[in-house]
Image (cartoon, grey):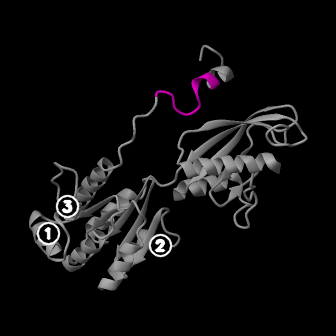
Amino acid sequence: MPRPDARPQEGHDLSWHIALHRLQEDAQPHVLATLVGAAGSTPREPGTKMVITPEESFDTLGGGTFEYQVIAAAREALTRGDTAPRLEAFPLGGRSGQCCGGYVHVLIEPFAGAERRIALFGAGHVGQALASLIAPLPWRLDWFDSRPDAFPPWAACKPGPPRLQLHLSGAEPAAISTAVHSLSPGSDALVMTHDHGQDLALIDALLKRRDLASIGLIGSASKWSSFQRRLREAGHDPDNIARVRCPIGIAGANGKRPYEIALAVVAELMTLAAARPNAPDKRGIVPETLRQAFGPDR
């Protein structure tokens, strides 16, 4: 079994709790591994923790083959997209081949990272209100504008808010194409720039991306009617054009203040989340395992 690097060159001196805080704040994928049970001779005692990401690990459960196996199990969970915790058993003499010969249980708690990624084009009044609403959520926000002074001080400060990336993007066609090409697959794109020409160019470019989760455009029904005609003239078929939501915002929200519009847009985004498959009746650590740990009456 290949051994993952348990001691990366960068960041490995951080304690698990500092690493956990940073990763949680940045909504980056990671696993918290906790030694929860021990029998016999073991390298560390229950309560010992380490944090594992796809590239790095922080702190230690004791080293050796056992720790390599924990890191491998954690990274496999991240690759699968697991979100539920599970217990892993490690007989140190049998599974891990370590001479101490003890037995440990490790709780593997995966965190998948950002729940969704938003691409926001425009830093006007509505864009700023929208960004402030998104900031506390476990979403990553890529925020674009063509004006160097458009972003508010709270967003442009150094270091900026976690999970927020500002992009100064030009208004010319090549710059718009580059910005749209840079978006992560599965992003929810929202267009609300200060210029209708930029809006149209962005929608044209976004419709060429078939891997986006959604596309939304701020504006009235008449603006959208004009855009649809010009998009058809640009060669987009009706089914592709229908991917665009315009106006944006949850149905029934009629407020016109920037913050009211932003609230309606965030509410609509939450309704667009991919439907979760029917969850099985038993999730996470199986009840039988917990009964063994806590007694039959629990």
Say which quadrant the C terminus sits in.
top right
Q: Earlier in the sequence, mark 1 or mark 2?
A: 2
* Residue under numbered circle 2: 157
Q: Earlier in the sequence, mark 2 or mark 3?
A: 2
Q: Is residue 298 left or right of residue 266?
A: right
Residue drawn at the location 53% of the way across and 43% of the way down: 83
CA distance for labels 1 and 2: 38 Å
Viewer-nearest of discs 1 and 3: 3
Circle number at residue 287: none
Label 1 sits on a secondary structure element that is helix
Viewer-nearest of discs 2 and 3: 3
Query: Looking at the image, which is closer to me, 59 or 227?
Result: 227
In x, y percent, where is residue 166? 43, 72
Residue extending farthest top: 297
Q: Is residue 81 left or right of residue 103?
A: left
Instruction: Name the amino acid, label 1.
Output: Gln
Label 2 sits on a secondary structure element that is loop
Q: Residues within 10 Å of mark 2 (few under 14, many from 20)?
A: few
| Relative vertical location of residue 144 with respect to residue 105 in this rendering, above or below | below
Viewer-nearest of discs 1 and 2: 1
Residue drawn at the location 79% of the way across and 33% of the way down: 38
| Residue numbers of the magenta segment | 281-289
Query: Is residue 69 in the magenta section?
Result: no
* Residue under numbered circle 1: 228
The part of the image, by quadrant, that contains residue 103 is top right
Label 3 sits on a secondary structure element that is helix
| Relative vertical location of residue 297 with respect to residue 260 in this rendering, above or below | above
Q: Residues within 10 Å of mark 3 (few under 14, many from 20)?
A: few
Instruction: Name the amino acid, label 2.
Output: Cys
